[in-house]
Image: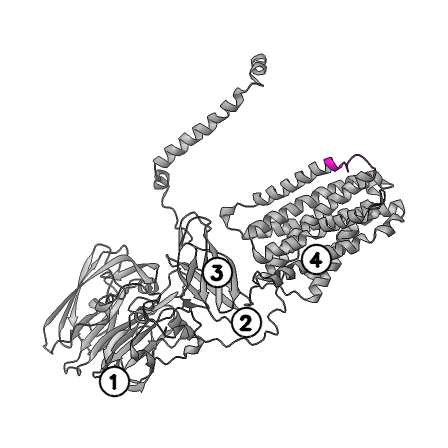
Amino acid sequence: MSESAVAVRGGRSWRLWAFVPLILLTAVVALFTAGGSSITGLLGENPPAPDEFDIRRVEFHPGEIRIRVTNPQRDDLTIASVAVDDAIVPFELDGPRTLSRLRSSEIVVQHDWVEDEPIAVGVTSSTGIQTVEEIPAAVQTPTASLDSFFGYALIGFLVGVVPVALGLLWLPSLRRAAPEWLAAFMALTAGLLAFLAVEALTEAFELQAALPGGLGGAGLVLLGVAFSYLFLTALAGRLGSGERTGGGGALGLAMLVAIGIGLHNLGEGLAIGTSFALGELALGTFFVVGFMIHNVTEGLGIATPLSEGRSVSWARLAALTLIAGAPAILGAWIGGFVTSDLLGVLFFAAAAGAAFEVVVEVTRYVARKAPGGLTSPHALGGFLAGVAVMYVTGLLVA
Amino acid sequence: MPKFTRKGLIAGAAAGAAAAPFARLAWPDSAEADPSATHLGHDHSHATSGHAAMIGPDVPAPGGPNDLDELLLPTPALTHKPGRVREYELLALDRTIEVAQGVEFNAWTYNGTVPGPIIRATEGDLLRVKFTNGGSHPHTIHFHGIHPANMDGVFEIVEPGGELTYEFPARPAGFHLYHCHATPLKKHIHKGLYGAFIIDPAKPRKPAQELVMVMNGYDTDGDGENNFYTVNGKAFYYAKYPIKVTRSQTVRIYLANLTEFDLVNSFHLHGDFFRYYPTGTGDQFEYTDTVVQTQGQRGIIEIDFANTGLFMFHAHQSEFAELGWMGFFHVTD
């Protein structure tokens, strides 16, 4: 028996045999569909479809409201009537009136909406079910102009690039620090990355929960986390940060930290851009300053591994800054102009996966390098300090 | 990523442009060549070009012209002849009807429409209403008026497939209504089982252009609140197809309220006044341009239009008006 199994294994025929279950599945599905809804007939009647729309985005332009709706259910859904503040309004459609599953349409309503006042839009299906979206305050949606393009870039630059660059300036100080303190700062990096990972994961789950069921559940988040975690694991192997301890290793680890932070900043920029575009966020001085303080520790996280190795050129420092900070600009653009909760879920999931992976890398590094290892007071204190610093500075932008 | 709350964003809100609730109602310059359009009493300046107008062909209202004629225009009153038999047949039917443009409602109807058919008799006629229940639930007909207890449509529940003939003399003269009185009452009424019931007085009313208007609402998503309001069953119908009347003759409207869920409904006429006779039972009237009715209340309105042109009428609850209870008279010489 074992001999024959060995004889069969390794040939090419396994590929053909792999089709057998698929072919049978197709046959069974075909039979079932041909049989109609006989099972439902045995069990009783199917409940009616909820017929609720998914209102994805409400934009306010001068004299005009644009409502993007998606059909989240299996059955078709037809847009019959539109109301603004409980008043039926004439509307035009940019897209189909009857939406099949996950299809979208944009409803355009001519309406003299009132700045800064709450407003509710309702979309009624042909079956009379009304889906209402309440907007706490109507503010004009930024349109894609050169001004807003630079505006979002500036936001991303201020909350992403600037703090990372400033944080990197801790490098000369770190180069002079005692080894146990260096270990403390490495642990601090791990702590802050762990904080970012948890935060990103929470955000990903929250966004995912708001997605229509048809776009998948929590598994989507796992997909993003796993993908970025494994991608960074593979990258870590290539950069050789794991085994060697030379300059390349230090730079490699710094690069990994930068990528992890960059992915996080992509999500952060996306969230800021989306919230601002949808009138959910006041971009005050305090907010931007809060983010700068919150994110300056990210620069510290990149600087710490660099302080181990040989001196690093300015060009490399600039590249690391851009890798970690510039995605915030990209995120702000995407969030401001496109707004997709689906992208948001994937970005935050990817950010979480990347941050977790880098936490693992940094922890290994600390375990190897720290005098006294992972359980030294400096390593433990550093990690906790990293989490605490992120939490406290995070309050500035809460 | 911290969650962005909107604390402080609403605070200090600058006063925006004042809302112009009826701005969209402005008459489109191109849609109507009729010179009477100039009578429309609304400020055109608010209408941004491209705004669809809530009058005429572009109004989102279901149905075609004359679709509601049977519910709007009663058959003429017959002269007083005591003992004459007036026979009607009412059939309860479950039907899906279009109550607002593109919006279907699973209604319970008398004879397929909401409201049901107009029942008209002259005081002293013997009414014989044969009721057949073709619906899927038990129903009755409860007439307002004076009749024996066993003709009241409360105790004699007609099961699906069953039938019952209501028979009683028509009195008192006035404007009344009928509706299903099976329980749960709220469900049976808001599903659409009601209609207008006119009893003409022995001494005929003076000739007039007679109209029937039954005010109602529809809760299409079952949350206990109406999504649409109408007269005679279709939202914005008379905004799309204004009611044509002439100035030379009195316009008499039999107005009843059968709106479920809301405490009251109302009728307001633009650009003129009318005489309102509560329940249509006496000669006392109020000279006004706005009347309020609770569910089951009704009365007779008589308008002698002073001017020609387009005159709006609607519920003077702005919300009802903007959810479908709005229309126009087109008054010509």
Whether discs 4 and 3 lie on one chain: the answer is: yes
The residue marked by circle 4 belongs to what chain?
Answer: A
Query: Residue B275 falls in which quadrant of the image?
Result: bottom left
**Which quadrant holds the N terminus of chain A?**
top right
User: Marks 1/4: CA distance?
Assistant: 72 Å
Amino acid type for the residue under numbered disc 1:
Asp
Q: Are marks 1 and 3 in contact (CB under 8 Å)?
A: no
Q: Position of residue B165 (x, y in %)?
A: 17, 63
Does the rendering let one see residue A388? no
Q: Secondary structure at mark 3?
A: strand
> Measured along the vertical axis of the image, is residue A208 above or below residue A374?
below
Amino acid type for the residue under numbered disc 3:
Ile
Mark 3 Cα shell of 10 Å, populated few (<14), some (14-19), many (≥20): many
Whether discs 1 and 4 lie on one chain: the answer is: no
Residue that mark 4 sits on = A157
> Measured along the vertical axis of the image, is residue A172 above or below residue B305?
above
Q: Are marks 1 and 2 in contact (CB under 8 Å)?
A: no
Residue that mark 3 sits on = A67
Residue that mark 2 sits on = A115
User: Marks 1/2: CA distance?
Assistant: 43 Å
Q: Are marks 4 and 2 in contact (CB under 8 Å)?
A: no
User: Marks 4/3: CA distance?
Assistant: 30 Å
Q: Which range is magenta?
A: A238-245
Query: Disc 4 or disc 3, which is closer to the eye?
Result: 4
> Does residue B22 belong to the magenta stretch?
no
B82 or A19, which is in the foreground?
A19
Does the rendering let one see residue A220? yes
Amino acid type for the residue under numbered disc 2:
Glu
User: Marks 1/3: CA distance?
Assistant: 45 Å
Mark 4 Cα shell of 10 Å, populated few (<14), some (14-19), many (≥20): many
The residue marked by circle 2 belongs to what chain?
Answer: A
